[in-house]
Image (cartoon, rainbow, N blue to C red):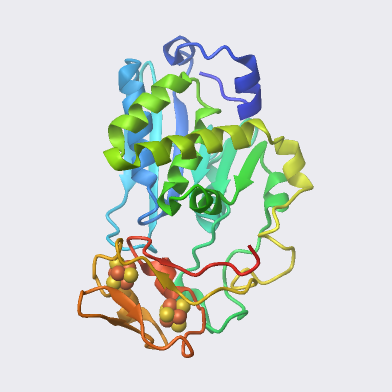
Amino acid sequence: MTTGTPKEVITAAALTAPSARAQERPTNVLIVGVGGQGVIMISKVIALLCERQDLDVKQSEVHGMSKRGGSVFSHLRFGQRVYSPTIPIGEADVLVALEWAEGLRWLPFLNPETGTFLADTQQLIPPFSCRSRKPGAVTNYARHTVAEVAGKVPNCFATDASRMAAELGNARAANTILLGMLSTALDFPEQEWLTVIEQLVPKKTIGANLRAFAAGRTWVEQHDPAAMHAEAPAVFPAAADLGDYVARSAPEINAAWCKGCEICVKFCPERCLFMNDRQVAELKDPDLCTRCRVCERLCPDFAITLHRLDA
Ligand code: SF4
Ligand code: SF4
């Protein structure tokens, strides 16, 4: 198995069976993010692809976060014969990050010569790392820009996948956009990815997930990793605070997705949310809301959105 830049793999268009390439050494894919983002779903897709190709696959993961905010990672190794489930430092062929700071944290695991870093630039700032929750307040969140990271890793593809997914109509499909990006870096035929995704996602979301997959794949095809040095996405203004540098709307709560867990109500620092008589979270007093985004980040069901007002 060889990995190169995703672009090289695509333009080679010789997506030969992984089994033919996987004889030399296992392929190592590390997937990282925080609870609720779909790290485990990505691992399952790859594991199933391997099974369908009769490849040996080993997976080691830490998960179990019932609410968003905790680190989740999954080591996946596959090839003709795999003996250990964990990826040594510096040997990940591909690092897939569903959250920017988590990606930065795991960068030492990426192969410094040939590794490919695929990242969602979405920032989920742990609420308790904020000294102040006021809009524009300085946080302790990582400040490395995409351009800085791109200058240090062999192949960097970073984009606001969460926003892309929201624009496609399903904010929860950001992980499938990352899957589309990942599909350009691994040698499985595109149709195999589609078949496995259809098998794994809920039936009513198949269409949305296939669109998200295609969007991620196309995005990589249209971007040159070398250009990432120069064109840091606008979401990462150099030297600006990464906390709440854009104005946001008051929280919009999607009643259909709210399962009534009350996490947002309990954690809102301003106490401006409550559970209504249908057991759905509701905003009590918009004037009290500081747009701190704590509720949005902690909702395990992505039911709360604070819209960017610059969009
Ligand atoms: S909006 Fe989210 S966090 Fe709040 S009660 Fe509903 S499911 Fe729970
Ligand atoms: S409603 Fe949400 S955004 Fe507003 S103050 Fe409470 S936690 Fe922060």
Write down the quadrant of residue 139 in the picture. bottom right
Q: Quadrant of ligand 2?
A: bottom left
**Foreground residue among 156 and 275:** 275
Q: Residue at x 53, y 67 (%)?
A: 307
Q: Position of residue 5 (x, y in %)?
A: 64, 28
Residue 207 vs 70, above or below: the answer is: above
Q: Quadrant of the C terminus?
A: bottom right
Write down the quadrant of residue 252 in the picture. bottom left
**Foreground residue among 58 and 235:** 235
Write down the quadrant of residue 153 in the picture. top right
**Foreground residue among 192 and 227:** 192
Residue 213 vs 81, above or below: the answer is: below
Q: Residue at x 25, y 80 (%)?
A: 276
Q: Position of residue 269 (x, y in %)?
A: 41, 85
Q: Residue at x 35, y 66 (%)?
A: 299
Residue 171 vs 208, above or below: the answer is: below
As drawn, the residue found furthest toward the right would be 230
Q: Position of residue 57 (x, y in %)?
A: 33, 26
Q: Kindly tell me whether residue 280 is visible in this rendering.
A: yes
